[in-house]
Image (cartoon, rainbow, N blue to C red):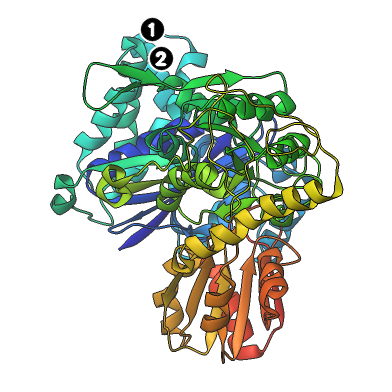
Amino acid sequence: MQLSWLIGGAQGLGVDTSANIFGDAVAKSGYYLYGSREYYSNIKGRHSYFTVMIGDKTMNSISENVNILATFDSETVFQHFYQAKDFIIYNKGLETTQIEMVRSMEPEIIMESESMLEKAGLGTTLIDAVNYAQKKGAKPIAIDYVGELDKIINALKISPPIAERAKNIIAISATYALLGLDKKHMLDAVQSRFSKNETFLKLNLMAVDAGFKYASSFYNLKDIDANKAVKRIQADGNTLSAIGKVAGGLRFQSYYPITPASDESTYIEANQILNLNGSQDKGGVVVLQTEDELAAINAAIGAALTGARAATATSGPGFSLMSEGISWAGMNEVPVLISYYMRGAPATGLPTRSGQADLKFALNVGHGEFPRIVIASGSHKEIFGDASWALNLAEKYQTPTIHIMEKTLANAYSILNVNDLNIDSVKIDRGKLETNLEDYKRFKMSDDGISPRAFLGQARMFYTGDEHNAYGHIDESVTNRTDMYKKRLVKLDTADKEIPQEMRLRQFGDQNSETVLLTWGSPSGVIEDTMEDMKKEGISVLAIQVKMFSPYPKELMQKLLAGKKRVIAIENNYNAQGADVLTEKTGIMPTNYILKLNGRPIMREEFIEAMKAIMQKGEKTVILNGGA
């Protein structure tokens, strides 16, 4: 069982809060969720929306078709009316609103919506958009928001601006009534969110009752009792990366505020005091907000040199500024982790949207040749595990390690079983540590390229941005330069030998299929979620998700792709950069491409249509453009 729900509204009016309350209530009934958040880059006023998938098993993608569209403003109706499949909840008082009067909508979106309405023989008012959805099978639910808010205002003796946000709760409560789940879960979710303010609590509890008046059970969902005995967590990608880092022994995190990376650091800051080993002893994570990203990477490098497990988190423009510091860390073999949240680029680009166009930048960041370990997560579960793994990789191989996550996953949330995260199995590997500190050589030659490490203050050592000898003193002689150059780079060969190639990719689907779907990051979720739907269309595939790009699992990829008839690259960039790395390392080129460039996640329906276009019509490249 799976249902899709969408709520939208102007930023700053509580859309995120209401979506989270709705999610809390549904989760209390035992169902799994996957919620995707989309929003404009301005602070307040523009359209934002939350799509939530509800199901009886874990999910990693969203649907373009929406079973229930919940709205209280006009723009959300005009932006999403064509997506409504079963129900469209709307504001009765706005029925005569003309689309051209919604000043916050972009002209292109207005033209597209008007075109759809006109082709259907309809006008361009809100009720016309509702009628369009109704013709497509969606039942309209008209809510008198003004009348309901007036009742609440009069009952509680509060001002209209305070009551305004209760529209969200009315909308989600009408939705919840349609699901047929126990009203108690919704009341509990509201109670949990507003328990500290009696007025807000009463206001929102009354809003719940108001919403339930407009709808009754349609889907007849029942609590899933089996899941209540399982410990579960509801979290977004930023939070899971933060938890993974802390579980992996993080002790220092630096950052400069940037979307969407900042949420990770602020979560660590709010939860930085730790109980160690179950005792009363406490440790913690130092979180430092710096003046810019240059300072952030340099602060993390300094902390790492003292022996702290250190990291920083940033997005595209910030990562650009960190480039010089990452080069310094490469020259000085510093075990520092950079959590890289990819978003729409170049320049400021789409600062609150997603993308995968920075992969080659991450692989080649900084000037000169030095080892960089680069991993990419494809799901919330992977984000948690990869965050702690990345800390181990950085320290074991004493080199900058880059952990790629996309905005799509950072701002999406899901329900996960705690046991699936394997928190208790997280191991900390600090790599080679020096115990003999007399005549200490920080950059001592070794066959594997890794020198035993001591921390600042334990022994005499020297660090410089210049080429140096084993002690760290500047040394530009030709023999030393060649030896040190090779020493640093051989570490990547060591990592390639030691890290099992099976850990560097994930494969699922039909091993015997002649068609391989090659991807990385978030698109793996939509592939996994549509496997059964593809089979219904007669499409059977093997999916390969690359998790580590440096060092690349070259031999295993050659083995898996040998003799395959069709290799389809699925990515959120124009040049299929992940597939380019495959070609660079193995000489194998994809035969087809499914690409998306507009900053929105790949959705299930558009992906299946793209697969059909390739498999049944022979299309070479399909560019997706779904989303609002």
Tell me if I can see residue 136 in this picture: no
- Pick the front one: 11 or 475: 475
Q: Disc 2 designates what residue?
A: 153
Residue in the image at 74% along x and 28% along y: 294
Side of 511 where 349 appears, left or right: right
Where, by quadrant of the figure, is residue 249 drawn? Answer: top left
| Position of the N terminus by quadrant | bottom left
Residue in the image at 30% along x and 43% along y: 423
- Pick the front one: 495 or 85: 495
Count of all numbered marks drawn on residues in the image: 2
Q: Disc 1 designates what residue?
A: 157
For label 2, the crowd category at 10 Å Cα-Cα, with few meaning under 14, some 14 to 19 and many 20 or more, is some
Could you say whether the residue bearing mark 2 is in a helix, strand or loop?
helix
Q: Residue 213: give x, y in percent of width and height.
A: 30, 37
Q: CB of mark 1 within 8 Å of CB of mark 2?
A: yes
For label 1, the crowd category at 10 Å Cα-Cα, with few meaning under 14, some 14 to 19 and many 20 or more, is few
Where, by quadrant of the figure, is residue 142 drawn? Answer: top left
Asked if residue 205 is positioned above or below residue 617 in the image, the reply reads above
Q: Residue 63: give x, y in percent of width and height.
A: 49, 60
Side of 435 where 569 appears, left or right: right
Return the mark for residue 315: none
Q: Amino acid at mark 1?
A: Lys
Residue in the image at 47% along x and 10% along y: 159
Q: Residue 379: give x, y in percent of width and height.
A: 46, 54
The Cα–Cα distance between marks 1 and 2, rounded to whole angstroms, is 5 Å
Q: Residue 575: give x, y in percent of width and height.
A: 76, 66
Tell me if I can see residue 401 in this picture: yes
